[in-house]
Amino acid sequence: MGIHRMSGRELAKTIGRGETYVRQRVADEKEWALSDISKICEAWDMSPEELISKAAQ
């Protein structure tokens, strides 16, 4: 999110989810749904592989 200068609130709006939902996943309390990952990749113009590799850094 930082690379794209996007807040949790903005990401939640982008993927059609609530702020609490996004916050729990960013904090690794719960897992992301594949559909959410797909929406994030589309919004950020990335492949899922790019997203995962950047998240691991």
Image (cartoon, rainbow, N blue to C red):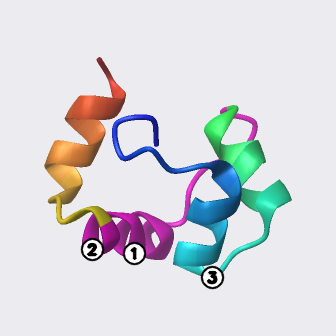
Dot 2 falls on a residue whose secondary structure is helix
The answer to whether the residues at label 3 and label 2 have Cβ atoms under 8 Å apart is no
Which amino acid type is marked by label 3? Gly
- Residue at the extreme front of the image, as rendered: 5
Asked if 19 appears above or below 31 in the picture, the reply is below
Q: Residue at x 63, y 82 (%)?
A: 16
Q: Which residue is mark 1?
A: 39
**Is 46 above or below relative to 42?**
above
Q: Considering only vertical position in the picture, is 27 above or below 45?
A: above
Secondary structure of the residue carrying numbered label 3 = loop
Answer whether residue 35 is magenta in the image: yes
Marks 3 and 1 close (CB-CB < 8 Å)? yes
What's the residue at 51%, 50% (across, down)? 6
Q: Nearer the viewer, residue 51 or 1?
A: 1
Which residue type carries mark 1?
A: Lys
Q: Few, some or many C-alpha atoms within 10 Å of disc 2 (few <14, some 14-19, many ≥20)? A: few
Q: CA distance from mark 3 to mark 2?
A: 13 Å
Span colored in magenta: 28-43
Query: What's the CA distance linking mark 2 and mark 1?
Result: 5 Å
Q: Nearer the viewer, residue 15 or 4?
A: 4
Q: Residue furthest top?
A: 57
Q: Magenta span has 17?
A: no
Mark nearer the N terminus (3 vs 1): 3
Identify residue for label 2.
42
Residue underneath mark 3: 16
Residue appearing at x 66%, y 51% in the figure: 8
